[in-house]
Every structure is written in C-alpha cells, then in structure tokens.
Amino acid sequence: MIRMNAEVLQEIENIGLEVVYKQLLAYSSMMLSKAIGKDEVHVLPADIVASAIGDALSEKEWNKDEFPTIMEFLKNLCINGCRRVYRKNVFSLRVSNDIFSEETIQAKVVDPVDLIDADNLKNEMKSLVVKKKKSIDDFIVDIFDARLAGYTNIEIAEYLSIDIKTVENQMKVIKRCIKPLRDGR
Amino acid sequence: MFDLYDLLAEDLAYNYEEAEEYLRQNEIPADALFEEKMSGIQDQIRAFKFKQGISKNEKLLTKLDSFFQLIQEQTQDRIFELFPPLAQTAYSQLSSDGITDDDIQTLRQDSSFLRFIESIDEDDLSL
C-alpha cells in the first residue's frame, strides 16, 4: 500500500523534484558546514534532504498556516535534520580525566571553539551590515539583531513600528551584504 | 546559532542559480547524489502515480458506462416522442374517422400491423 500526500507531490512537481532537491541540498550543506565545519559534509546533507522530502511526501502533516509554501515546509524539515546532526556532533559525550580523582568524566558540553566560531561569524556579519546603515533612521542593524533573536519579519515590523515591506527589503539588503561570508569558513 | 546560519543560507533554498553555484563551488556532486538518494523516492512516486492512474481509469470507465446508459434511455424516449408507433396512430385514426383507402395503405405498410394480420387465423378471415 503506497501512502503519499498528493498535494505535496503536486507542489513539488510544479517546481521540479530535481530543482527542489538541489536547492535544499545547497541549503543544508551550507547550514551544516557552518554548524559543524566538516570538510566532507556533503553526503550527510544529501541524506537529510532525501529524508525531508520522503517525510513530506508520506507522513508529515503540512501546516500551511505555519509554512505557506512547500519550500518553507521542506526547509523547516531540513533545518530539523541539521539540528539533529548538529546536536549529535556538538553535544555528544566528551570524555575527560579529573585531575584530582583521576576518574574519567563524561559530560555533554558545547565545544568552546564552536561558540567562538559562531560569535566570530556573527561579528563579521554585523560589521558588514553596520556598513550598510545609511542614517540614524535606518533600521537595518536593528532588523539584523531582531532576526538573529528569532523574530519573524511581521514581528520585527510591529516591534519597530515600520512597514513590513521595509523589513523585507532590508532583509534582502542584509542577505546581499553577508553573502561573501558563505564560503568564508 | 542556527538562526545565524539560516540568515546566511536561506537564499540557497529559494534560488536555483545560487544553489547550483554554491554546489559547484563546493564541489558537491549534486547530480550523482540526486540519482543515488532520490531513486527510491522516485520509484515510490512512479508507483503511486501508476496506482492513481488505474483507479482514475476505473472511475472513468464507470462514468462512461453510466453515460452510455443514460444516452440510450434518453434516445429511446426521444424516438418514441418524435415517431410514435405507426400502428398506434393508424388504430386511433381508425376508431375516430372510420377507414379510408389511404388508411388501409398505411396499415399495410406498418410491419406491426402486418404481423397482426399474419397472426389471425384464416378461419377468422373467412368471417
């Protein structure tokens, strides 16, 4: 018995399965290479994307209120896959020896290098965004900070009392100016 | 942390040219990976479509049958409406106006009337 979500299939085929796969592959590769910094990271994202598309077609419920387009839905499934890999890598048990008792200690910790890398990237991105700020009334840096804090474009527009179009346009400017950092690792 | 990377990577998920450029620059064999990882899903999609096609075909045939049945019934009704049986017309005329030579000619041409004549015993005719 083949169980498949015909609507999801139709939406994917409207874009093209190969196009969808490659876009998500590039996206997931980028996310993971930044998050865990592996050189041979491309095999893992390939599995994550295939799994995300398979899940979307068969078992996952597509909540259109949360994810209005099929790409947003699939991108979210890929992020979740990347997060799982990231947690497995970064929060895996790290073994060290207690210098006083000489006992082996296992603990889940974040590698400080990962935190420093993320912090550096954030600073680099912010310095590029700050350069784009034209005047005191320009909200571009605030929008950047709010986006990193996890706010949506609508929430940012409400929070800053500005038009949603302004936020969207500024987001495009931000993405253009941080683009050189994509391959910077 | 993922919000940070998402900000950097988001465009790749929506822009095919940028995604292809990224895959090429990072030497990720996207075509080979697509063939390898998606072949199972493509098989499932084909099987699903095939199954959907069969059920659609069955539905279509059922509808076609109903359509033919409906057309047949309506055609019969229409024929009876436009061309009432000649014998019926002839008998009704006979009862109201009496019989003329033309009526006799018409009745003879009517096959149902001829069958009726044939069915009558010769003894009855001699009356």
Image (cartoon, coloured by chain):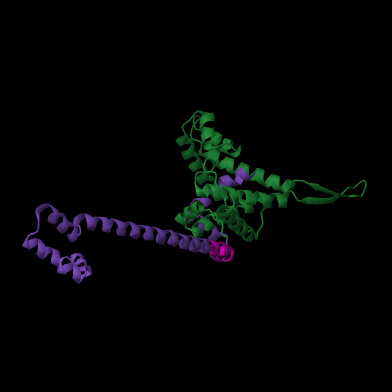
- Where does residue A116 sit, x and y in percent of width and height? 69, 45
Q: Residue at x 10, y 65 (%)?
A: B105
Q: Residue at x 31, y 57 (%)?
A: B73
- Which quadrant of the figure contains the N terminus of chain A? bottom right
In the rendered structure, the colour chosen for chain A is green
Q: Quadrant of residue A53?
A: bottom right
Q: Is residue B38 highlighted in magenta?
A: yes
In magenta, the rendered stretch is B33-44
Q: Quadrant of residue B114?
A: bottom left
**Residue A42 vs residue A115: left or right?**
left
Work out whether residue A10 or residue A19 is closer to the camera in this orientation and state it: A10
**Residue B70 vs residue A179: left or right?**
left
**Residue A88 vs residue A184: left or right?**
right
Give the main secondary structure, helix, strand or loop, of the magenta stretch: helix
Number of numbered labels in the structure image: 0
Chain identity for the colour purple used in the image? B
Whether residue A75 can be seen here: yes
Work out whether residue B25 or residue A42 is closer to the camera in this orientation and state it: A42
- Where does residue A81 sit, x and y in percent of width and height? 63, 51
